Image (cartoon, rainbow, N blue to C red):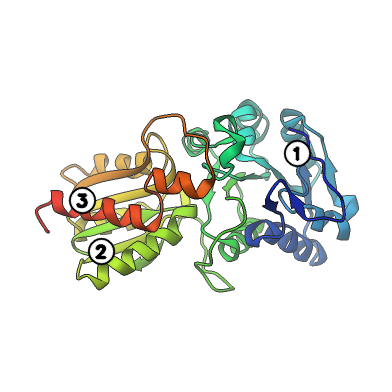
């Protein structure tokens, strides 16, 4: 898809490129470049949708524009990394993870190059653009690639912290972010450490393990559940790989049931990763995987889709209550 718009406007087909997470990308890269880090940005004709136009205006020599040739873009990013640069390569998550899977695996991960892949507008956040533009398989694909770190941040502040932390991280990274309209979960500066989950609450009845866009509605759902006397915990599992196994094991010993929440197919993503840890333990508590149930996502405004799939606060609360009831705890 080609991107055309008035250069004086930040509005593109209803998407606001100045929204928190996406402006964060340009703002953080500008700061890192000013500090002397060898960062460059690479995109496929989406510099307005991902906010990299803000980086291009300040550091025009550091933005590489490839048009709608995403596979070439990823291979070129690998080439840039061999010359001492740290490329941040950004396009829609559906294109990056699916279309460019071979280039990510062979040119970047197999070659152990410090490329940072930014899959934006992930999950079902592109709404009316259609199922072909929804990314509900990307976590499963990316976490199956050896030596590739996979991160799904909750908001702009956490994304900025993750970008900064990546300056000293040895592996290539796939960052999964949403549209950039993310509600605030963390104040700046946000806590972030690769492979170290953030414990919001501890609970004996149920622990919700969420990632990315699902952290904020999970926070709201847990507030309601706890105010009603339910002993429900919440973990922000921002790093899908390497996974914080210790946090999962601790929650499994504390809670009678675990529930993963993700804007992704329930197969292979966060739910699959947690299930693998619990299977290794043997005799672990029941796990409920909440997300998109192995189907192609529908076409509608994102808000309608979140309600339909019960991925809003109300839906997550309802699923949590059902999980608690199934344990005989209601």
Cα distance in 3D space between marks 2 and 1: 43 Å
Query: From the viewer's perspective, is 237 left or right of 149?
Result: left
Q: Nearer the viewer, residue 85 or 291?
A: 291
The mark lying in front, picked from 2 and 1, is: 2
**Secondary structure under badge 1?**
helix
Residue located farthest toward the left when viewing the structure as drawn: 328
Seen at 71% across and 50% down, the residue is: 50
Circle 2: is it few (<14), some (14-19), or many (20+) Cα within 10 Å?
A: many
Q: Earlier in the sequence, mark 1 or mark 3?
A: 1
Cα distance in 3D space between marks 2 and 3: 13 Å
- Residue 117 image point, x, y percent: 65, 44
Seen at 81% across and 42% down, the residue is: 83
Q: Nearer the viewer, residue 262 or 199?
A: 262
Q: Which mark is residue 322?
A: 3
The mark lying in front, picked from 2 and 3, is: 3
Residue at mark 1: 77
**Secondary structure under badge 2?**
strand
């Amino acid at each position: 898809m080609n991107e055309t718009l008035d250069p004086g406007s930040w509005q593109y087909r209803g998407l606001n490129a100045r929204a928190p997470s996406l402006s964060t990308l340009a703002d953080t890269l500008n700061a890192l470049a000013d500090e002397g880090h060898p960062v460059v940005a690479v995109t496929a004709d989406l510099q307005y949708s991902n906010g990299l136009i803000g980086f291009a205006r300040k550091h025009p020599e550091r933005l590489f524009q490839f048009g709608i040739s995403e596979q070439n873009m990823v291979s070129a990013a690998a080439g840039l990394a061999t010359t001492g640069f740290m490329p941040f390569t950004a396009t829609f998550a559906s294109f990056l993870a699916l279309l460019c899977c071979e280039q990510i695996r062979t040119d970047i991960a197999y070659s152990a190059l410090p490329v940072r892949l930014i899959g934006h507008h992930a999950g079902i956040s592109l709404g009316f653009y259609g199922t072909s533009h929804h990314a509900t398989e990307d976590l499963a694909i990316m976490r199956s690639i050896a030596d590739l770190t996979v991160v799904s941040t909750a908001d702009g502040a956490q994304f900025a912290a993750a970008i900064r932390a990546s300056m000293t991280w040895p592996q290539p990274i796939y960052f999964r972010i949403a549209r950039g309209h993310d509600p605030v979960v963390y104040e700046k500066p946000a806590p972030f450490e690769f492979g170290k989950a953030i414990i919001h609450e501890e609970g004996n009845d149920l622990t919700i393990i969420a990632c990315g866009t699902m952290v904020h509605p999970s926070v709201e759902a847990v507030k309601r559940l706890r105010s009603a006397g339910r002993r429900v915990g919440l973990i922000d599992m921002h790093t899908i790989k390497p996974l914080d196994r210790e946090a999962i094991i601790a929650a499994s010993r504390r809670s009678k049931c675990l529930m993963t929440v993700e804007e992704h197919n329930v197969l292979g993503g966060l739910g699959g990763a947690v299930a693998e840890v619990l299977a290794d333990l043997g005799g672990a508590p029941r796990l409920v995987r909440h997300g998109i149930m192995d189907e192609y996502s529908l076409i509608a405004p994102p808000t309608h889709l979140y309600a339909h799939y019960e991925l809003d606060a109300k839906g997550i609360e309802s699923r949590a209550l059902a999980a608690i009831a199934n344990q005989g705890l209601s």
